[in-house]
Amino acid sequence: MVNSNGEILADDEAIFTYNNRAFKYGDALFETVRYVNGTLFFWEDHYFRLMASMRILRMEIPMEFTLEYLEEQIKKTITANELENGAVRIRLSVYRNEGGLYTPSTNNVSYLIEVSSMKSPFFTIDNGTYEVELFKDFYVNKDMLSNLKTTNKLLHVVAGVYAQENGYANCLLVNTDKKVVEAINGNLFLVKGNEVKTPPLSDGCLDGIIRKNLMKLIAASEEFDLVEASISPFELQKVDELFITNSIIGIQPISKYRKKEYNGTVAKSLVGKLNAKARIGV
């Protein structure tokens, strides 16, 4: 069951026409949220990122689009799928209503909520092999649109196909300045000694929710020093650790890049703190 503009529909029920702007132009945003036993992890951060992104894309924000309304609709969808007592992956998509060509005939929007069950109630560390490679066929632009979670993800799709064809778990993406900015499905962090480094938003990485909250944890820690700076591909084989973050996996350690193998010591030390922050919602 899915939720289309507040109406619960069967998975196989038709929702879109061929004029849907998300289909035709990628004119849409989405948030992927983790839910556990009544709690939406980092929900306020997701909500305010969505609102800010809608303003940037000149979408009209409906009066009913309050924090409470969208949370209610998400939980309504979870209940309709009988998942309220477990761990759930949520995708909330917002798309401009159909009409027009490149220039829309309206800025009004619709939304769709999809849910699916997850195995683990909290973020856990995967200790298995996780090898990555640079993807250099296409580049991330250094602009604000790259910071947004839009459905314009062709670069990420092609990078995913490249990773699959070559036996990699993921790829690292580079921007037009040849700086490493993120992974296909999340933000990137490097660890060397007690320094934890991540690219700045100005380099074109996604303005990730876990990135934001992990940076706060690291900055407040006496154990680590946080650095937000551009990352050269040459740095990747000189650091002690690499890991990826997103709202579903939390933290994913990278085990290998080319000839360099990494440990996941810092990632393991941070995941417990991230779970605690998610539970109390601050």
Image (tube, rainbow, N blue to C red):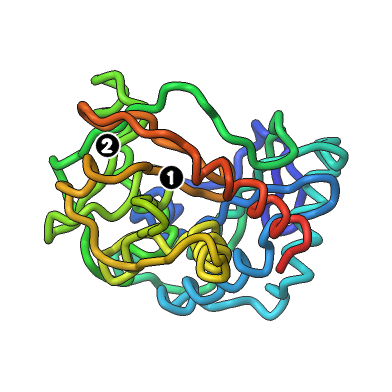
Q: Residue at x 13, y 40 (%)?
A: 137
Q: Position of residue 145 (x, y in %)?
A: 33, 67
Q: Secondary structure at mark 2?
A: helix
Q: Residue at x 41, y 73 (%)?
A: 57
Residue 25 visible in the displayed image: yes
Comes first in the chain, label 1 or label 2: 2
Q: Residue at x 48, y 59 (%)?
A: 211
Left or right, 29 with respect to 282, comes to left
* Relative to 27, residue 2 above or below: above
Q: Position of residue 105 (x, y in %)?
A: 41, 73
What amino acid does circle 1 point to? Answer: Ile
Q: Position of residue 221 (x, y in %)?
A: 56, 65
Q: CA distance from mark 1 to mark 2?
A: 16 Å
Left or right, 194 with respect to 173, comes to right
Left or right, 216 with respect to 74, comes to left
Crowd band around label 1 with a 10 angstrom C-alpha radius: few (<14), some (14–19), many (20+): many
Circle 1 residue:
244
Crowd band around label 2 with a 10 angstrom C-alpha radius: few (<14), some (14–19), many (20+): many
What count of labels does the image hold?
Answer: 2
Q: Nearer the viewer, residue 196 or 214?
A: 196
Q: Position of residue 210 (x, y in %)?
A: 54, 57
Residue 97 visible in the displayed image: no
Using the rendered view, name the quadrant where residue 12 is placed.
top right
Name the image quarter holding the N terminus.
Answer: top right
What amino acid does circle 2 point to? Answer: Ala
The nearer-to-camera label among 1 and 2 is 1
Name the image quarter holding the C terminus.
Answer: bottom right
Circle 2 residue:
159
Q: Secondary structure at mark 1?
A: strand
